[in-house]
Amino acid sequence: MSVTVRVPAKVNVQLAVGAARPDGFHDLANVFLAVGLYDEVTVTPSSDGLRVTCEGPDAAQVPLDRTNLAARAAEALAARYGRTPGVHVHIVKDIPVAGGMAGGSADGAGALLACDALWGTNAPRGELLEICAELGSDVPFSLVGGAALGTGRGERLTALEAGGTFHWVFAMAGRGLSTPAVFREFDRLAEGRDIPEPVASRDLLDALAKGEAEALAATVRNDLQPAALSLFPELADTLAAGRAAGALTGLVSGSGPTTAFLTRDAGSAERVAEALRASGTCRSVRVASGPVAGATVL
Ligand SMILES: C[C@](O)(CO)[C@H](O)COP(=O)(O)OP(=O)(O)OC[C@H]1O[C@@H](n2ccc(N)nc2=O)[C@H](O)[C@@H]1O
Ligand SMILES: Nc1ncnc2c1ncn2[C@@H]1O[C@H](COP(=O)(O)OP(=O)(O)OP(=O)(O)O)[C@@H](O)[C@H]1O
């Protein structure tokens, strides 16, 4: 017997970042949108204890030891329910690794939901969300999906209304960026400046609620973008290529280095994707739309 869970990637349509807190994290106003690029996590009972395997184009970059977020999720659920995590976790990875699209977080949320179903623990939703928040700031959103505002370090979620489907193009970069390194660069660039409290933009939330791509494009904002560009200057060429190809806007996704382009409709997304592939400014290109549902048992 085994259980498979499908989990989407995310793009941050607004990422407002406050000053560093005493615990090293940053308070955020993080407007998440789940998009249709998915990892699949399958759990099967195993007599040799906890084991992780991974397949997919980026599989070689995924750690298979206890640092894998899927392994940590299985251990965390087992610990709460006094079980041993005797499970084989297999990840079919389609979300870019270290790309700012919450791929590791998706696998953490997926493994948690899959083990909950496999073991019949039936943990209440609130408890699953608590475990997610312990695993990482983005993990709760991977569980719930859709569109949501994350506050605190991004783990406290309020569901948001999205009045339509948004069509995106994602350009994957030739190397990854480390999330802590990008936050450290944000701090370095912010030195000597007053950092305002992060707040969600009313205009952005309205555009999202109305499903209006042009209005959303006019309001998207990522405060980590200057830090990501500082560590990875070539991303400016990718952003320029996507905008020149007719995207409504382009921005760095989360801590990067994936760049995300919002387009008018599905046809426009295909044209922007083709132009980005031909531009030679990125490793690969994918089209995906959202919002989509969060972690789902198949
Ligand atoms: C950039 C985003 O992806 C936007 O959604 C998230 O804020 C990052 O979420 P994540 O990868 O789940 O991050 P975590 O695993 O919680 O934290 C990794 C590291 O990122 C930094 N970090 C993360 C979240 C946050 N609100 N402030 C931070 O400063 C910290 O250095 C932390 O040690
Ligand atoms: N299941 C996993 N899949 C991918 N990376 C993982 C996983 N578990 C742990 N990691 C580690 O986490 C690092 C970041 O990977 P991940 O793909 O989650 O980055 P990300 O998409 O930039 O994350 P975020 O958008 O949440 O900041 C990897 O370099 C890897 O060492």
Image: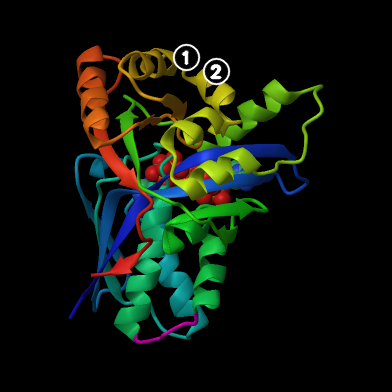
Mark number, residue 230: 2
Kindly state the secondary structure of the residue where label 1 is placed.
loop
Q: Residues within 10 Å of mark 1 (few under 14, many from 20)?
A: few
Question: In the image, is the residue at mark 2 within 8 Å of ligand 1 by its beta carbon?
Answer: no
Question: In the image, is the residue at mark 1 within 8 Å of ligand 2 by its beta carbon?
Answer: no
Kind of residue indicated by mark 2:
Ser
Q: Please state if 271 lies on the left or on the right of 176 as rendered.
A: left
Residue pictured at 50% horizontal, 50% vertical:
209
Residue pictured at 24% horizontal, 79% vertical:
47
Q: Is residue 235 above or below residue 148?
A: above
Q: Is residue 219 above or below residue 128?
A: above
Q: Please state if 92 lies on the left or on the right of 172 as rendered.
A: left
The CA distance from mark 2 to mark 1 is: 6 Å
Residue behind mark 1: 233
Residue pictured at 42% horizontal, 18% vertical:
235
Q: Please state if 78 lies on the left or on the right of 296 as rendered.
A: right
What x and y, as percent, mark residue 142?
Answer: 43, 57
What x and y, as percent, mark residue 188?
Answer: 69, 24
Q: Nearer the viewer, residue 89 or 142?
A: 142
Dot 2 and dot 1 residues touching (CB under 8 Å): yes
What x and y, as percent, mark residue 176?
Answer: 39, 31
- When asked about the image quadrant of residue 236, the answer is top left
Is 123 within the magenta? yes
Q: Nearer the viewer, residue 156 or 108?
A: 156
Report if residue 66 is visible in the image: no
Q: Which residues are magenta?
A: 120-124
